[in-house]
């Protein structure tokens, strides 16, 4: 009898403490450790209550124990009857719900609503993917406790029951709102993540679903986070100047930068290496080519300024041939003979040789550094060819080491080869034109010296004949 009473009392206590425990567990949002502590606490309370009931039962007299036993059995029978009644009610409700669902489905099929709802779910699924990638989502952020538009559309598409009117209206609303926003230029406040990873509110200007800017910088949309971030590298200055004018506009029409691919071209554009990065890719050969080119530019500028000054001095001397000055080639040629009349030779052949000697003495000064420029022009493509060969060696070495022709692995070697070629041609072509310019200037000055020396020889011969 006692054993039976203990069992019945345990059942009653378990039923008494089970509901609070389950309610407490459902309301708790803690970790598994907290849940385990709650279970231990409930179990300890149950054991303490059981021990108390057993102590009370053992302390009672035989008549009291019989009464307590009878009361426990009556309570057990009462709970069993209630449980059986609830089970029957639950089974009846399941049958009724199944019947109602079947009737609802039959009516929906007769009205053709299943196809309509199926199409609506398919549209919701397709639109949710588009809206997830759209930067317009940064403007329509859900309020606290509200389901976001992408989450709602996906939940709607996953529903197995017939949707409500409110659900269908929101699907239409989200689609219409996206279509309307795509044709707008909007200015709004939202959260923007900086390059340091810290998020903060900022004023954002959105051009449809294409471009977003803030504080004179372009932004990119992160669909997985649903936030806007600053580009790690901004676009070139020509685009930034357009952006600055666009953000300052308040009305009318303004020029703007729009990426019709919704950020794809922008991300590719900012990944382009700068000129310094390209030069670094060329490594040692590239630096040698640049050194040769820099030396050629310095030499060209020095000789260009020198020839211009000489040309000015010769032009000044050309206007005053009777008074030669030694600060220019023409004056020195004239002084070689006119400064001392005794040096004018009686023999015409000797005078001609003297004049040729004076002109030849000036030619190296006028053609200085042109040989170096010709050397730089010839060496540029050759150095570029060396860089090309080195780059191809690196490419084939990467293929040999990895055993695959992955373009990513070969990009470094091919890039080095191409950059070296470009640098070699890049210094050769400008220096070729520079050398041609210097040659033209020097030839012009030499031509003046030849003409004046020939005129001076003719004049000396004429004087001898008149004498």
Image (spheres, rainbow, N blue to C red):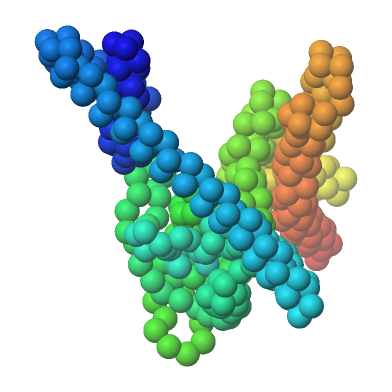
77 relative to 342, above or below: above
Q: Does the rendering let one see residue 218?
A: no
Classify residue 249 as left or right of residue 450: left
- Image quadrant in which the C terminus is located: bottom right
320 relative to 160, above or below: below
* Front position in the image: 467 or 169: 169
Residue lying at the far bottom of the rendered structure: 252
How many marks on residues? 0
| Residue 303 spot, x, y in % from top left | 62, 46
| Residue 114 spot, x, y in % from top left | 75, 70
Classify residue 210 as left or right of residue 407: left
Q: Quadrant of residue 198?
A: top left
Classify residue 464 as left or right of residue 279: right
| Residue 161 spot, x, y in % from top left | 63, 62
Q: Residue at x 32, y 12 (%)?
A: 1
Q: Residue at x 56, y 56 (%)?
A: 93
Q: Residue at x 31, y 33 (%)?
A: 75
Residue lying at the far front of the rendered structure: 63
Q: Does the rendering let one see residue 409?
A: yes
180 relative to 9, above or below: below
* Front position in the image: 216 or 119: 119
| Residue 418 spot, x, y in % from top left | 79, 36
* Front position in the image: 68 or 170: 68
Q: Quadrant of residue 265?
A: bottom right
* Front position in the image: 257 or 35: 35
Classify residue 133 as left or right of residue 404: left
Q: Residue at x 46, y 60 (%)?
A: 147
């Amino acid at each position: 009898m006692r054993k039976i009473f203990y069992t019945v009392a345990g059942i009653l206590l378990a039923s008494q403490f089970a509901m609070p425990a389950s309610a407490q567990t459902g309301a708790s949002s803690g970790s598994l450790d907290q849940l385990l502590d709650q279970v231990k606490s409930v179990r300890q309370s149950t054991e303490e209550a059981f021990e108390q009931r057993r102590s009370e039962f053992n302390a009672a007299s035989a008549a009291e124990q019989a009464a307590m036993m009878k009361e426990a059995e009556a309570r057990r029978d009462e709970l069993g009857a209630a449980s059986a009644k609830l089970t029957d009610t639950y089974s009846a409700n399941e049958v009724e719900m199944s019947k109602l669902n079947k009737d609802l489905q039959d009516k929906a099929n007769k009205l053709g609503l299943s196809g309509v709802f199926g199409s609506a779910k398919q549209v919701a699924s397709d639109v949710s993917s588009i809206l997830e990638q759209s930067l317009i989502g940064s403007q329509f952020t859900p309020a606290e406790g509200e389901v976001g538009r992408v989450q709602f559309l996906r939940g709607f598409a996953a529903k197995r029951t017939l949707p409500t009117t409110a659900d269908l209206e929101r699907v239409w609303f989200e689609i219409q709102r996206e279509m309307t926003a795509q044709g707008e230029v909007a200015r709004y406040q939202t959260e923007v993540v900086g390059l340091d990873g810290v998020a903060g509110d900022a004023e954002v200007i959105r051009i449809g679903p294409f471009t977003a800017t803030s504080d004179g910088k372009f932004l990119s949309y992160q669909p997985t986070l649903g936030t806007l971030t600053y580009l790690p590298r901004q676009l070139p200055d020509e685009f930034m100047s357009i952006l600055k004018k666009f953000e300052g506009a308040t009305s009318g029409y303004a020029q703007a930068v729009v990426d019709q691919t919704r950020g794809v071209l922008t991300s590719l554009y900012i990944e382009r290496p700068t000129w310094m990065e390209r030069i670094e890719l060329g490594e040692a050969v590239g630096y040698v080519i640049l050194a040769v080119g820099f030396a050629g530019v310095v030499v060209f500028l020095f000789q260009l300024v020198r020839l211009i000054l000489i040309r000015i001095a010769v032009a000044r001397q050309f206007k005053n041939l009777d008074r030669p000055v030694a600060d220019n080639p023409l004056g020195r040629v004239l002084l070689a003979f006119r400064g001392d009349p005794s040096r004018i030779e009686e023999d015409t052949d000797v005078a001609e040789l003297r004049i040729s000697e004076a002109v030849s003495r000036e030619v190296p000064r006028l053609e200085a550094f042109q040989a170096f420029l010709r050397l730089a022009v010839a060496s540029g493509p050759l150095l570029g060819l060396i860089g090309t060969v080195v780059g191809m060696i690196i490419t084939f070495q990467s293929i040999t080491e990895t055993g695959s022709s992955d373009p990513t692995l070969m990009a470094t070697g091919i890039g080095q080869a191409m950059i070296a070629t470009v640098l070699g041609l890049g210094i050769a072509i400008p220096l070729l034109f520079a050398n041609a310019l210097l040659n033209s200037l020097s030839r012009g000055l030499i031509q003046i010296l030849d003409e004046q020396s020939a005129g001076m020889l003719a004049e000396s011969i004429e004087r001898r004949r008149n004498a």
